Image (cartoon, coloured by chain):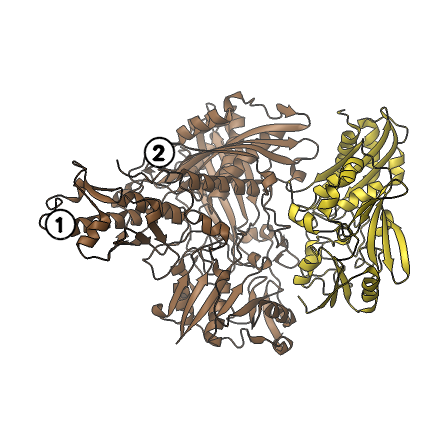
Chain colours: A yellow, B brown
Amino acid sequence: MKPFTYTRADDITSAVSEVSQQEGAKVIAGGTNLLDLMKIDVMQPRHLIDITRLALNTIEETAQGGLLLGALVTNADTAYHEQVEQRYPLLSHAILAGATAQLRNKATDGGNLLQRTRCYYFYDTHTACNKREPGTGCSAIHGYNRIHAILGHSEHCIATHPSDMAVALAALEARIHVTGPRGERTIPIADFHRLPGDTPEKDTNLADDEIITSIELPSKGFAQHYTYLKNRDRASYAFALVSVAAGLDMEGDTIQEARIALGGVAHKPWRNPEAEALLIGKRASRENFQPVADAYVQKAKGFEHNSFKIELACRSIVRALMQAAKIDQ
Amino acid sequence: MVTKQIGKPQNRVDGRDKVTGRARYAAEFSATDLAYGVVVSSAIAKGKIKEMDTSEALRVEGVLDIFTSENRPKLASYDSSFQDEDAPPGSPFRPLFNRDILFNMQPIALVVAETYELARYAASLVKVEYETEEHVTNFEAERTNAYEPEEYKSTPPPDPWGKPETALKEAEHRISEVYSHPSQHHNPMEMHASTAIWEGDGRITVYDKIQGVLNSQEYIMGVFGLAKEDVRVLSPFVGGAFGSGLRPQYQLFMAVMATLELKRSVRVVLTRPQMFSFGHRPKTVQQLSLGASADGTLEAVVHHAFAETSRFEDYSEDVIIWPGVLYKCENVKLSHKLVGLDVYTPLDMRAPGGTTGIFALECAIDELSYKVGMDPVEFRLKNYSVKDQNVNKPFSSKELQECYRQGAELFGWKNRNPQPRSMREGHNLIGWGVANGAWEATQKPSGAKAVLTKEGKLTVSSATADIGTGTYTIMSQIAAECMGLPIENVEFKLGDSSLPQSPLEGGSWTASTVGSAVKLVCEKLGEKLLELAQESDDSPFKEVSIEEVEFTDGQMRLKEDTSVAIPLTQLLKENQKDSVQVEAESKPADEQENYSPYSHSVVFVEVNVDEDLGTIKVTRVVSAVAGGRILNPKTAWSQILGGVVWGIGMALEEYSVMDHQYGRFINHDLAEYHVPVNADVHDVEVIFVDEEDQIVNPLGVKGLGEIGIVSVAPAIANAVYHATGKRVRDLPITLDKVM
């Protein structure tokens, strides 16, 4: 860990001005990922601005009938919030599928979106990693890549985003409210995380001097027909190999709208609206789900140790949709 | 009525200290002026350090010194000085000895500073340039160069018996398959740590994470040329070790070196990634060919093992002895070769060789039972062995059949449909599997001391360890029962090199070895107390022999007439003694030579396998153990339960991933090196069958540290086959291998 300075922000304005003026400054909230990465020199901020005292820790109803999750609400408080449990059970389930009770008690919703990849090479400063040190190369492409991406990867990086929460937010089409020296703006979740391209060091489209203030959930929560299905190498406290957040809007057994987001397969939660559209007006059935699953992985490309994820993603989508539709066959 | 302590489900005597934080571990001891050392690890697997620049690190205020191969103090240079009680044949690794890099994450410098944070920061500023040489870490590629070591650390492969090749060829049913598991790391909760306290005048006291303080003491004496009286090593509590603490690890070397040089107390704690920089369970590949006659008689076993070792030591473990222990077979051929890689030497890890060899054997036996068309339990019982064919000696006891009977009944084995893929619930396939196993039940020589005070407090001690196994508790029970005292009046001391000698805590031999020494020293104490009573002429004990007295309720009394009794406190006071002290050295009886002592187990497992997604859940486990006399059902249950949990990990999760680009274990933290979590562990039932053994040692105990794990992974693999019809022979059985 490199020496750093630390201040605690009293209000959002001073936090923003500090983060934009201090070189190498980083915002810290729960710190469940940042501190780990600092201890092993993967992240080396020179200045930390603690925003945990800011008034961004409430969950409120929006005029549009949705919910606004303050960036500092903890993952645990979000998952167990009555409104979230009732109206957005998909989000609740996704959060509870991640990390441990202790981590969820500490980690914030804003921080969850900003967590870094779990790629082994990103974590080991004695290996090449374009995300950690641009230009050094990607060790995972020819290394051990069991947990890596099958979609949207580039020759520079094949890392995945580890969040479960973000996968549900992608399915729910959440909107991320941010603020910075140039004012406030809203980023749709689909545009929040980036694909690695040739700048894998950038995980998100949040500017270095911007801070997440809240996450807005639109009114539609898919509370009747939803599933968060997470496949992993042990039953708890493991990142997803492949996860699926599925939400269906159904009338009888006919699908009006379908949302499917995949986790563990790409540098961001993976949506395919064209494939989702195949389900509109269709009856919920295995036969109708299979082409959607196939479409999702059509362009997938695996590596030496993770090609199984393609078939796993396909099967998981079918299973998740069956569960969401509450059908057996 | 004699006070019964042995066999009681006594709570851990150190339980309260552990849960309240009073129990202190190696990194929790402090001293005035304590300095902190952080180890710099190499970034390459093979080559030389060309240049190391420590100038920037040394400029950090608070950094006291940086030790490298260039400025280290003079050390012993002979291999023998660096060898320890558990060293395999070869040339042990000597930290900071020269510029050579022998394995990745090799310790190459120690930064010592006023605080841990400063030391860690300064360590990150040390710049190293390497002359890199090509490393070999790919086991498969190097297997063509496998060799038989000049000297085996393990039992050398027994000579073949019968006509294995012919018998195999002529057998009605045959299987020939390859089984493998990857390297695995122990990953105890407590990371390796040493706190070396400078006592002045060249004397040191060291708190070390070790499974035997005498091993650390000898090592320090050998490497640094210190006299025995100048080094005391303590290790009162160990936060799990599982074999990782059998050999002194390099943090001990580093802490002691810095303390002697700086004449100041120094603590060195390894990081979690550094826990992947030393001994581990070696990657092993086994070729097993079995043949059986039409009626299910095992006719031939050919078992070849290939296991990883380092370039500098020939580590081997008992992988191939198990066919000769577990099954009756007339035609057997065994071999064990090593594959030398640029890695640190492997190290005993819970049931070393046993978990490995029994996994392969028990999967192969299962496969053969299907070929023959017999129930897997029936097939095993048909080929049941009554003697250890490796050494041609009968077992000292073997209640394995009873394990089968009780285990099968509790599990409900008779309701099993033998057909694979025959049981399901929704999209889950259900499978039932079984495996049996064994582990050596040895006794080693050990010393013990007993001191009884006039207040009636008994302290018994030995330089053994308690690595979470319950040594403190069971030794207190043995002493309390022998002397007829309430357990609250008994204290057992361990983990101190000034105490009577005892071997490393490992091999499941501590209950038997130290327990026998405790029993013996208490018997001697009894004799001494009787002699004391006989000093006065009017004593009612004057003419009696030790066989005629018993110790109970804090008294010594006559067995024939229990009204003739004297409280021990009174006995000491009447004889003006503040205390009575005796020492004893116990040794295995010669009679043991005529027998082969083993504990045995059968494990029944139920798994649920998601047919589409491949996820495996171990829903039920019944482990039936024949482990001799059970000293404490509660700590014994914990031991077996822990073995089951680890067996689940071995079967489904554990995998130290070697990246051949770097020659480095790459998943070096607990987020990515998976061990079971609570959600992976469901119903686990443990049965101890009655087993009387008058040969194995005076207590009749067999030790339970390793028998709990050996049969678990194969039982799971066999259950996965029964569920899915797929044989996965390469551990861990991850979802991609079954979906």
Q: Position of residue B145 (x, y in %)?
A: 54, 54
Total count of labels: 2
Q: Position of residue B40 (x, y in %)?
A: 59, 67
| Amino acid under disc 1 | Gln
Q: Position of residue B206 (x, y in %)?
A: 43, 65
**Marks 2, 1: nearer the viewer:** 1
Kindly identify the residue that appears in the image at 31 percent across and 53 percent down: B459
| Amino acid under disc 2 | Glu
- Outermost residue toward the left in this view: B537
- Res. A195 in view: no
Query: Mark number for residue A163?
Result: none
Of labels 2 and 1, earlier in sequence is 1
Q: Position of residue B499 (x, y in %)?
A: 33, 59
Residue at numbered disc 2? B691
For the residue pair A67 and A21, the one nearer the viewer reads as: A67
Residues at marks 2 and 1, common chain? yes
For the residue pair B615 and A142, the one nearer the viewer reads as: B615
Spatial separation of the CA atoms under disc 2 and disc 1: 39 Å
Kindly identify the residue that appears in the image at 76 percent across and 52 percent down: A72
For the residue pair A23 and B517, the one nearer the viewer reads as: A23
Residue B2, quarter of the rendered image? top left
> What is the secondary structure assignment of the residue under circle 1?
helix
Q: Tell me the crowding category of disc 2: few under 14, some 14 to 19, or many 20 or more residues within 10 angstroms, Cα based.
A: many
- Res. B489 in view: yes
> What is the secondary structure assignment of the residue under circle 2?
loop
Quarter in which the N terminus of chain B is drawn? top left
Left or right of B215? Residue B663 is right
Q: Callout 2: residue from which chain?
A: B
Query: Mark number for residue B534?
Result: 1
Q: Callout 1: residue from which chain?
A: B
Quarter in which the C terminus of chain B is drawn? top right
